[in-house]
Image (spheres, helix red, strand yellow):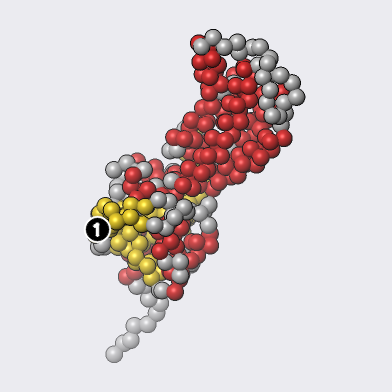
């Protein structure tokens, strides 16, 4: 009797490879997929490219995936209870809404690794139906922070945890990858908001009399950040982007222009220097004051976009109350 020996390839490995192959079909062909072998929680890294003339250039954006291929998607119901952001309080209301989800168990050792990577490096769990060639995704970093840790801070003491992926987080065709592009910009957004907060603090030491001129250096520096490309997904950031462009192009914000127009309509003399501000040594006109207020408000609003990301944006596409009410059905 002959005994067959040699290295074995199990069915799980084959299904896993099929899952990655499905993603190659679903993701835009210009994206570069790099597989990790052996992997320690991260199966693939994807580098995002965008069209430029007749070629494609890298955006410098990378996103990581834990890929789970399966021949049988486990779909069920999940109760999403009304609550505030868990950063503010852990109280959960009695009201809830049931949503359709994909259920998938995952090792807590992987989750612990993702948590150590921090939320600036998004890792997405992507469950691939290899028969229907479609995929379901959720950001593990945000899931850990907003769902697991608040209810199970000692989750690593158990071997596995069931992850609930909203059924609407599905990729069937190329246009469905827009949320993936959004997550890929996370590191750029964190860098933008860090710089914005630094500049805002430095603005405390700028004199009001020369603020209109001095601020242009800061404005040029922060406008170079490629994170502004995320404004097409982030409406609040788009508003700030428009204000910043107005400042750079015309030397005034739209807020300043609208405010001056309203003052003129009610008969105010906007050019008479008869007003004092805390950070000025001379009397200033309403025109000067509105410029100063508009500039400082612009940086306040930019920093507030970072708060919006933390308060709401991280829950987009999660099975949470905030995720449901802030995402399109």
Of the pair 92 and 326, the residue shown nearer to us: 92
**Residue 4 appears in view:** yes
Residue 51 percent location from the top left of the image? 46, 36
Residue 58 percent location from the top left of the image? 52, 42
For the C terminus, the image quarter is top left
Of the pair 70 and 309, the residue shown nearer to us: 309
54 vs 223, left or right, is left
For the N terminus, the image quarter is bottom left
Residue 242 percent location from the top left of the image? 51, 27
Residue name at image x 44 percent, y 35 percent? 235
User: In which quarter of the view is residue 68 placed?
Assistant: bottom left
Element assignment for label 1: strand
206 vs 302, left or right, is right
- Extreme residue in the bottom direction: 1
Of the pair 271 and 125, the residue shown nearer to us: 271
Of the pair 24 and 101, the residue shown nearer to us: 101
132 vs 31, left or right, is left
Residue name at image x 40 percent, y 74 percent? 159
**Residue 22 appears in view:** no
For label 1, the residue is: 77
């Amino acid at each position: 009797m002959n005994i067959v020996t040699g290295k074995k390839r199990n069915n799980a490995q084959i299904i896993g490879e099929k899952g990655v192959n499905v993603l190659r079909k679903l993701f835009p062909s210009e994206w570069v997929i790099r597989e990790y072998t052996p992997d320690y929680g991260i199966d693939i890294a994807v580098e995002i490219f965008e069209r430029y003339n007749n070629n494609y250039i890298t955006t410098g954006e990378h996103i990581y995936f834990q890929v789970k291929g399966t021949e049988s998607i486990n779909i069920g119901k999940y109760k999403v209870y009304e609550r505030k952001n868990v950063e503010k309080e852990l109280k959960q209301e009695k009201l809830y809404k049931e949503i359709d989800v994909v259920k998938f168990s995952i090792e807590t050792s992987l989750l612990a690794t993702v948590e150590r990577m921090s939320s600036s490096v998004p890792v997405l769990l992507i469950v691939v139906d290899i028969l229907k060639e479609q995929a379901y995704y959720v950001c593990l970093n945000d899931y850990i922070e907003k769902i697991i840790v608040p209810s199970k801070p000692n989750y690593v003491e158990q071997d596995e945890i069931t992850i609930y992926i909203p059924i609407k987080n599905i990729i069937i065709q190329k246009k469905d990858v827009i949320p993936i592009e959004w997550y890929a910009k996370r590191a750029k957004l964190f860098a933008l908001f860090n710089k914005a907060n630094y500049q805002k603090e430095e603005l405390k030491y700028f004199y009001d009399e020369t603020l209109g001129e001095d601020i242009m250096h800061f404005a040029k520096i922060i406008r170079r950040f490629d994170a502004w490309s995320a404004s097409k997904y982030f409406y609040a950031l788009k508003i700030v982007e428009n204000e910043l462009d107005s400042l750079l192009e015309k030397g005034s914000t739209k807020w300043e222009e609208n405010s001056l127009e309203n003052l003129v309509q009610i008969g105010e003399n906007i050019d008479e220097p008869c007003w004092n501000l805390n950070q000025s040594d001379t009397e200033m006109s309403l025109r000067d004051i509105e410029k100063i207020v508009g500039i400082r408000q612009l940086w306040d609003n930019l920093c507030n976009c970072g708060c919006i990301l933390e308060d709401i944006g991280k829950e987009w596409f999660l099975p949470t109350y905030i995720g449901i009410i802030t995402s399109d059905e």
